[in-house]
C-alpha cells in the first residue's frame, strides 16, 4: 500500500511521475504518488548533471523492486514506474546491467535482425526502421494496422492462435525470400499478449552459405582427427595391436617384458602381420619413448645411396650432395630407437658396414674422416627365412647374432582367426572415421566368412578387404559378396602350378643337357624366377599383386627382377 499526504492510495503495480527541471512534481499517478519514491527520483533528477540517469534502471531503497524507464523532453523528466515480484527476469536483467536500455535498443533497431511486434489482436505495435524501409513505409505509419495488410504471407496471426513458435521458415515478401522466426509472447499469467516476427537471414542462400561453412569446419575437424596420429609421429602403442587371442596375449606379454630392456630385438613373421606395430609398441614402452623412433626400410634404399642414407654425408661428398651435408639415420637415432625394417634384404657389402656400427655405435659420414658415435636401440624386422639365408650365405652370421639378442615371432592371421571379428570392426570403424562415412556395418554371416579364409596377406590383406568392401558396398550393410577376396587369397601357387613350372623349366628348350644339370641353388633360383614370370602374367604386370600371390615382399620381387634383367641382357 502507498501513501499520499499520509493517506493510502491503493495497491497498484505501475505508475507515472513527471518532474520539472527543478525536481518539483508536475504529475503523478499510481506508484508515482508515493512520496518516498518522489523523493528518491527527485534527488536523482536534481543531480542528473553530476551523474547522468540511464534510460532504464532499478530504483534502489524502496520496499519493493521497482524498474524505472526515464524519458526527457524540454528539461522535464518523465518516469514510468513498474513494480514487480522477486525473481522477475526483466528486473534481474535491468538491475544487473546498467546499460540494459542500450541492449534493448540494439535488439529493436538491429538491421540484421529486423523485428515486427503485434498485439493480441494482430495489430502492429512496432516495426524496426530497417523493416519499415524494406516495405516502403514512413516511420510509425504501420502502427495499429493489421499485420496481414502490411506484410504479405505473414503467419504472425496464426502464431497468435496456435501459440506455437515457428523457426527458420522461408517467407516471400516483395519478391524476396527471407528466413524468419515467429514467436508468441506470453505474460506472467500465461496469456498470449502478442507475437514477434524476426528476420534470421536475408535469404535462403545465406542459410546455405552458413551450412556450407559448418560442413567445411566439420571436414577440417575430421581431417585433423585423422591426421593427429601422424602429427604425433605415429605414436602407436600396445593398443594398436588389435586382438584378444592367446597368440596376441602372449605376444603382448613378451613385448612388455622386453620393452624396458635396452637389447636388440629381431621381429620375424610373414608379410602383413604387423611387425611395424610391434616395433612401435616396444619403443613406446621403452625408456627412449620421449623421442620419435627412426624408421629405415633397408630394402627400399637404392644400393648406391645406402651408405649416405644410413651414415649421412658431408657437403660436396658426391655429385648431387647437399652443400650443408645431411644427417644419416644412425645419427638421427641417437638416444632413441632405430627400426631397420626388411633387414633381410640388405646387400652383403652394406651388412659389413652396419655390423661395425652396431658393435660399438661408431660410424663416419660419407666424405668425412671424423669418427661419430650414436647411442640407439636397434629393432630389426624381416619376413625372410634367416636359416636358409645363413645356409646359402645371403646373410652374415655375425650380423644375425648382433641383431637377434631377442627374437620375437609375430603370428600370422591364420593362427589367430578368433581375432578376425575385432580386427574387422576396428578396420571398419577407422575407415569410417578417416573418410567421414557413417552407418556401415557387417551383415549376417560376413564375419564367419572372413574367419574361413586363410589370409596369406595376413592382417594387411584383411584391412584392405574391409576397406574395399566399405567402398564398393551398395548399401550400408556389407555382405559376403562385398568381401569377396581376389585370387591372391589362395595361399600362393597350387601344387599343380608348381609342377607345371618345374616341367617348363626342365624342358629341353631351356638349354639343359645331361652334362649341364644345374646345382640345387641354381635350380631353386630358376624355379623362383619361373614362378615370378607366371605371377606377373597372371596379374598383367601388377607387381604388388604378384608379390602377395607368391608370398614374398615387393622389395624381394624387385631384386629378383633386376637379376632376371641382368641375366638376359
Image (cartoon, rainbow, N blue to C red):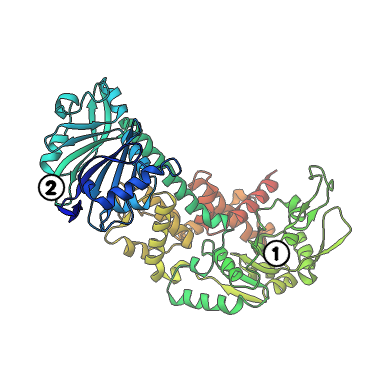
Residue 31, above or below 171: below
Q: Residues within 10 Å of mark 2 (few under 14, many from 20)?
A: few
Disc 1 or 2, which lies upstream in sequence? Answer: 2
Q: Is residue 348 left or right of residue 63?
A: right
Residue 498, above or below 42: below
In which quadrant will I find the C terminus? top right
Residue beneath disc 2: 191
Depth check, front residue: 193 or 405: 193
Find residue 380 and report its horizontal and vertical position in percent.
65, 67
- Labels in figure, total: 2
Q: Is residue 488 left or right of residue 168?
A: right
Find residue 237 and report its horizontal and vertical position in percent.
54, 67
In the image, farthest residue toward the front: 5
Depth check, front residue: 253 or 462: 253
Q: Is residue 555 left or right of residue 132?
A: right
Query: What residue is drawn where x is 56% and y is 75%?
Result: 255
Residue beneath disc 1: 394
Amino acid at each position: 500500500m502507498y501513501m499520499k499526504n499520509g493517506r493510502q492510495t491503493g495497491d497498484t503495480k505501475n505508475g507515472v511521475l513527471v518532474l520539472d527541471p527543478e525536481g518539483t512534481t508536475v504529475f503523478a499517478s499510481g506508484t508515482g504518488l508515493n512520496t518516498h519514491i518522489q523523493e528518491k527520483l527527485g534527488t536523482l533528477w536534481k543531480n542528473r548533471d553530476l551523474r547522468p540517469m540511464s534510460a532504464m534502471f532499478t530504483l534502489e531503497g524502496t520496499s519493493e523492486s521497482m524498474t524505472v524507464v526515464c524519458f526527457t523532453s524540454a528539461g522535464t523528466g518523465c518516469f514510468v514506474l513498474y513494480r514487480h515480484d522477486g525473481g522477475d527476469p526483466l528486473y534481474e536483467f535491468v538491475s544487473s546491467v546498467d546499460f540494459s536500455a542500450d541492449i534493448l535498443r540494439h535488439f529493436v533497431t538491429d538491421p540484421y535482425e529486423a523485428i515486427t511486434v503485434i498485439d493480441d489482436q494482430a495489430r502492429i505495435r512496432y516495426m524496426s526502421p530497417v523493416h519499415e524501409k524494406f516495405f516502403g513505409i514512413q516511420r510509425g505509419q504501420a502502427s495499429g494496422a493489421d499485420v496481414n495488410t502490411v506484410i504479405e504471407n505473414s503467419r504472425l496471426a496464426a502464431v497468435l492462435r496456435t501459440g506455437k513458435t515457428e523457426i527458420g521458415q522461408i517467407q516471400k515478401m516483395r519478391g524476396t525470400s527471407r528466413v524468419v522466426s515467429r514467436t508468441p509472447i506470453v505474460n506472467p499469467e500465461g496469456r498470449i499478449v502478442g507475437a514477434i516476427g524476426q528476420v534470421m537471414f536475408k535469404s535462403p542462400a545465406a542459410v546455405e552459405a552458413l551450412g556450407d561453412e559448418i560442413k567445411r569446419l566439420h571436414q577440417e575437424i575430421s581431417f585433423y582427427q585423422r591426421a593427429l596420429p601422424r602429427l604425433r609421429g605415429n605414436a602407436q602403442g600396445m593398443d594398436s595391436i588389435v586382438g584378444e587371442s592367446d597368440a596376441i596375449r602372449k605376444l603382448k606379454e613378451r613385448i612388455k617384458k622386453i620393452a624396458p630392456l635396452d637389447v636388440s630385438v629381431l621381429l620375424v613373421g610373414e608379410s602383413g602381420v604387423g611387425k611395424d606395430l610391434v616395433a612401435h609398441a616396444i619403443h613406446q614402452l621403452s625408456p627412449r619413448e620421449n623421442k620419435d623412433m627412426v624408421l629405415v626400410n633397408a630394402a627400399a634404399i637404392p644400393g648406391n645411396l645406402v651408405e649416405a642414407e644410413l651414415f649421412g654425408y658431408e657437403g660436396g661428398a658426391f655429385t648431387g650432395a647437399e652443400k650443408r651435408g645431411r644427417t644419416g639415420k644412425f645419427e638421427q637415432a641417437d638416444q632413441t630407437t632405430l627400426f631397420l625394417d626388411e633387414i633381410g634384404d640388405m646387400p652383403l657389402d652394406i651388412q659389413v658396414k652396419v655390423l661395425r656400427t652396431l658393435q660399438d655405435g661408431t660410424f663416419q659420414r660419407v666424405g668425412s674422416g671424423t669418427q661419430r658415435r650414436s647411442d640407439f636401440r636397434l629393432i630389426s624386422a624381416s619376413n625372410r627365412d634367416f636359416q636358409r639365408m645363413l645356409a646359402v650365405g645371403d646373410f652374415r652370421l655375425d650380423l644375425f647374432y648382433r641383431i637377434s639378442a631377442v627374437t620375437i615371432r609375430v603370428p600370422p592371421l591364420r593362427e589367430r582367426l578368433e581375432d578376425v571379428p575385432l580386427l574387422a570392426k576396428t578396420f571398419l570403424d577407422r575407415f569410417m572415421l578417416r573418410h567421414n562415412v557413417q552407418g556401415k556395418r557387417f551383415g549376417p554371416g560376413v564375419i564367419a566368412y572372413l574367419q574361413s579364409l586363410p589370409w596369406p596377406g595376413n592382417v594387411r590383406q584383411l584391412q584392405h578387404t574391409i576397406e574395399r568392401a566399405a567402398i564398393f558396398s551398395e548399401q550400408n550393410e556389407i555382405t559376403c559378396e562385398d568381401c569377396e577376396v581376389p585370387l591372391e587369397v589362395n595361399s600362393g601357387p597350387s601344387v599343380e602350378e608348381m609342377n607345371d613350372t618345374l616341367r617348363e623349366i626342365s624342358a629341353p628348350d631351356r638349354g639343359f643337357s645331361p652334362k649341364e644339370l644345374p646345382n640345387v641353388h641354381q635350380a631353386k633360383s630358376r624355379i623362383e624366377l619361373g614362378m615370378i614370370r607366371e605371377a606377373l602374367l597372371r596379374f598383367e604386370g601388377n607387381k604388388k599383386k604378384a608379390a602377395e600371390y607368391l608370398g614374398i615382399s615387393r622389395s624381394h620381387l624387385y631384386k629378383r627382377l633386376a637379376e632376371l634383367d641382368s641375366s638376359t641382357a
